[in-house]
Image (tube, rainbow, N blue to C red):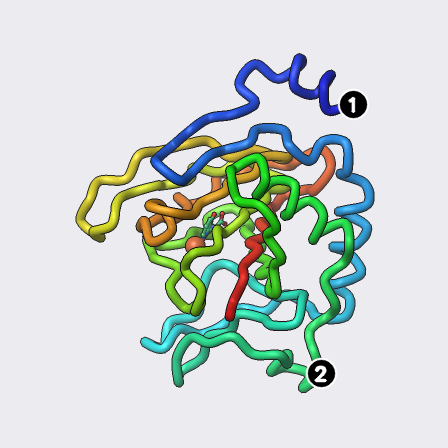
Amino acid sequence: MSDLFAALSNPRPREDIADGAVLLHGFFRNTEAALIADLRAIVQQAPFRHMVTPGGHTMSVAMTNCGAKGWVTDRSGYRYDAHDPDSGKPWPAMPASFADLAMRAAEQGGFQNFAPQACLINRYRPGAKMSLHQDRDELDLGAPIVSVSLGLPATFLFGGLQRADRPQKFRLEHGDIAVSGGPARLAFHGIAPLADGDHPVMGPQRINLTFRKVQ
Ligand code: MD6
Ligand code: FE
């Protein structure tokens, strides 16, 4: 499908959600097959696992990574690490299909030359959620975060710079990309518990890819 046709067949291709944050609905529709094939290969090398927070809670979201650095959490804290702690091996390389998509989406969000070093891959089964948080483990907060949704729809909670700011709700569907940077880079955000369902392409799950410049 051409980008033009995708745009014409999508009633709301672009949704500005905050100063510095935009949702690009249906953005990856024409590159879906390569993206999913590359995702499967990554997960074979570095399987999903439920990590433990510094506070000792096992996360309901299962995670893995690709790229030069991967985000990890354990009892000692959050950090970026070049190695998968489960295997001791470097994380799988970031495929061109991932890096190209992230760069094109960042450009649409107003951020030129985005070169992500890390891609955190989140897997939600029904009931899994992501509590409100800020992404602040990256040294360069001038770079945006690009977030790609696959599979079951989710409710994205997008708040302000204070944890107590009441979040707004946005629907994220298969093919949607969020770009958040600038004044929105440190906004609190999360994902409401995933509803039951069976996605025609991805099955009973939601996968989210978040691309970051780490250093
Ligand atoms: C998710 N996303 O969509 C979780 N972080 O499953 C995030 O935590 C996130 O969507 C930073 C920027 C965009 C995001
Ligand atoms: Fe986040």
Q: Which image quadrant is residue 74 in?
A: bottom left
**Distance Cα–Cα, label 2 vs label 1:** 39 Å
Inspect the image, locate mark 2, and give the three-letter code of the amino acid beneath it.
Lys
Q: Does residue 158 appear left or right of residue 47 in this picture?
A: left
How far from the left and from the top, in percent, is residue 145? 50, 52
Q: Is residue 3 left or right of residue 132?
A: right
Residue at the farthest front position: 112
Secondary structure under the numbered disc 2 in the rendered image: loop
- SS class, disc 1: loop
Mark 1 residue type? Ser
Q: Give how far across and how far down residue 151 sits, in percent.
A: 63, 40
Residue at 49%, 38% in the rendered image: 154
The CB of the residue at mark 1 lies under 8 Å from ligand 1: no
Q: Nearer the viewer, residue 112 or 168?
A: 112
Pointer 2 residue: 89
Q: Residues within 10 Å of mark 2 (few under 14, many from 20)?
A: few
Q: First in sequence, mark 2 or 1: give its number.
A: 1
> Measured from the top left, where is residue 24 in percent x and y?
55, 31
Check the image and report above or below for 168 versus 112: above
Q: Quadrant of residue 157?
A: top left
- Identity of the residue drawn at 77% across and 54% down: 96
Q: Is residue 101 left or right of residue 111?
A: right
Rendered position, 77 above or below 149: below
**Residue bearing the label numbered 1:** 2
- 206 to 5, vertically: above or below: below
* Neighbour tally class for label 1: few under 14, some 14-19, many 20 plus, Cα within 10 Å: few
